[in-house]
Amino acid sequence: MTRRMFSREFKQEAVELVTKRGVNAAQASRDLGIHATVLRRWVLPRLMAPQLSPEMAS
């Protein structure tokens, strides 16, 4: 069995389902056909990383 590769865009859209649209990871993973653990690994760094505010970016 080979490992599936996912594009950066696919991962980003999957993470946004959970972080911005409020879909829980289990449901989103079923809808996308991926394992919930995989999706959670993509979501966790996004939740843990501090977001730069526009004022701090300049």
Image (tube, rainbow, N blue to C red):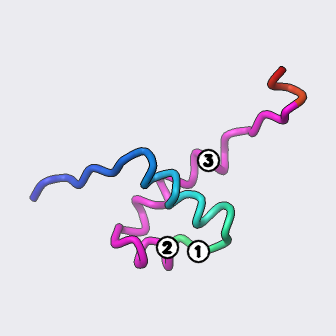
What residue do we see at 42% from left, 55% from top?
A: 10
Residue 45 is a magenta residue:
yes
Q: Mark 1 and mark 2: span between their CA atoms?
A: 6 Å
Residue sitting farthest toward the top: 58
Q: Where in the figure is residue 51, as x and y percent of width and height?
A: 75, 39
Check the image and report above or below for 34 versus 9: below
Residue 34 is a magenta residue:
yes
Checking the image for residue 24, the label placed there is 1
Checking the image for residue 46, the label placed there is 3
* Residue 34 placement, left or right of 18: left
Q: Residues within 10 Å of mark 2 (few under 14, many from 20)?
A: some
What residue do we see at 66% from left, 50% from top?
A: 47
Check the image and report above or below for 41 versus 27: above
* Residue 3 placement, left or right of 17: left
Name the magenta segment's main secondary structure. Answer: helix
Looking at the picture, which amino acid does disc 3 mark?
Answer: Arg
Residues at discs 1 and 3 in contact (Cβ within 8 Å): no
Check the image and report above or below for 51 versus 28: above
For the N terminus, give its image quadrant: bottom left
Looking at the picture, which amino acid does disc 2 mark?
Answer: Ala
Q: Which residue is mark 2?
A: 28
What residue do we see at 42% from left, 63% from top?
A: 37
Looking at the picture, which amino acid does disc 1 mark?
Answer: Asn
